[in-house]
């Protein structure tokens, strides 16, 4: 099982955007952290990224805890306590990786997947290591957003889940336990329930994309930093929510397919910032401005709730 960060050696497979930020989480907590990334160009920028971000977070003294690994074939697996998979979100790639890991890791190594959608039971299907396989789903950017989902597979040992939750807490994260392996787990199911209604209202011409965003950010979403939807019902009165739900629920969107406004943009390759066009138009300059604004607000929000986040020793 996993113990304190100082006693834990972590291997992160995949050094892309998510994998690199997960490495920051582990290293700032005090874990000896190895990162495997196959792309040589990406490997060139990672050391400076790790150094800069850890300095920004106030943990520059722990930058030495992160090392890059250039091959998994010649890697010493004997001391690895935890593997976190952060490869592309394709089921066959994940299944192949875990099948390979089963052949090389020691019997105590915990095997975690950062998949945002595939059930861990599906990834672990047919593997002898399924009892110590578990979902560990971070949110972008992982080193800023405190929550991490600890997701049980059908055969995951409770001891594995409990020890992983304790390790994440010691790394300054807020773990939430998801006891049933549903597609989307916990947070993404909540997020997509909101998104389905939002894009249905865009399709129906009820509201513009701009007004949808304003209603969430400056309306009910503004309160979420202070209290989640369950606590808010106790604040407002459960009977008020029940009465409103009885009126609203019958008209909510329940379509099993994505909204036309999304589907049309995917077909047109209007995918957002990466293609210069999504719901809004983007240039390199406006992307830089928006990302800076976005990151600054996230960091300010983090400061507001700092007292409620586990302390890192």
Image: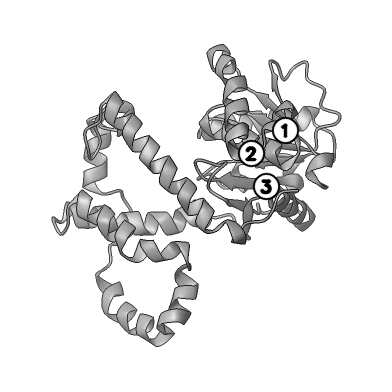
Q: Distance between the residues labelled 1 and 2?
A: 9 Å
**Which residue shows up at 85% across the image and 38% down it?**
107
Which one is closest to the eye, mark 3 or mark 1? 1
Residue nearest the observer in this picture, 108 or 129: 108
Using the rendered image of the protein, determine whether residue 14 is visible from the camera's viewpoint.
Answer: no
The residue pinned by badge 3 equals 134
Q: How is the image coloured?
A: one colour
Tell me which corner region of the image, top left, top right, bottom left or bottom right, holds residue 263.
top left
Cα separation between marks 3 and 2: 30 Å
Quadrant of res 305: bottom right
Q: Foreground residue, 224 or 136?
A: 224
How far apart marks 3 and 1 lie (CA) works out to: 27 Å
Q: Position of residue 3 (x, y in %)?
A: 83, 47
Classify residue 97 by image quadrant.
top right
Q: Which mark is residue 219?
A: none
Q: Residue 58 carries which label?
A: 2
Seen as rendered, the residue at the extreme left is: 205
Residue 282 drawn at (x, y percent): 25, 30
* Residue behind mark 1: 62
């Amino acid at each position: 099982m996993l113990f304190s960060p100082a006693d834990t050696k972590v291997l992160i497979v995949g050094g892309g955007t998510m994998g690199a930020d997960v490495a920051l989480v582990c290293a700032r907590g005090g874990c000896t952290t190895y990162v495997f990334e196959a792309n040589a160009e990406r490997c060139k920028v990672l050391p400076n990224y790790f150094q800069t971000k850890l300095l920004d977070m106030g943990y520059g003294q722990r930058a030495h805890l992160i090392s890059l690994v250039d091959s998994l074939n010649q890697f010493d697996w004997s001391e690895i306590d935890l593997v976190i998979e952060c490869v592309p979100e394709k089921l066959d790639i994940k299944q192949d990786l875990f099948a390979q890991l089963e052949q090389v890791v020691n019997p105590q190594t915990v095997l975690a997947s950062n998949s945002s959608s595939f059930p861990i039971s599906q990834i672990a299907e047919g593997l002898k290591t399924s009892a110590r396989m578990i979902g560990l789903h971070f949110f972008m950017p992982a080193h800023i957003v405190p929550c991490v989902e600890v997701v049980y597979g059908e055969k995951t040992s409770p001891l594995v889940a409990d020890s992983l939750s304790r390790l994440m807490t010691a790394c300054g994260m807020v773990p939430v336990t998801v006891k049933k392996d549903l597609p989307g787990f916990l947070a993404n199911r909540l997020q997509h329930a909101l998104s389905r209604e939002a894009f249905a209202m865009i399709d129906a011409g009820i509201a513009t994309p701009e007004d949808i965003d304003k209603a969430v950010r400056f309306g009910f979403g503004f309160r979420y930093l202070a209290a989640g939807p369950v606590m808010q019902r106790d604040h407002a009165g459960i009977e008020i929510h029940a009465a409103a739900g009885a009126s609203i629920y019958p008209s909510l969107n329940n379509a099993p397919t994505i909204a036309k406004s999304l589907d049309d943009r995917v077909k047109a390759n209007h995918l957002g910032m990466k293609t210069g066009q999504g719901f809004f138009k983007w240039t390199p300059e406006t992307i830089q401005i928006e990302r800076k604004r976005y990151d600054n607000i996230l960091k300010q929000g983090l400061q507001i709730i700092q007292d409620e986040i586990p302390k890192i020793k």
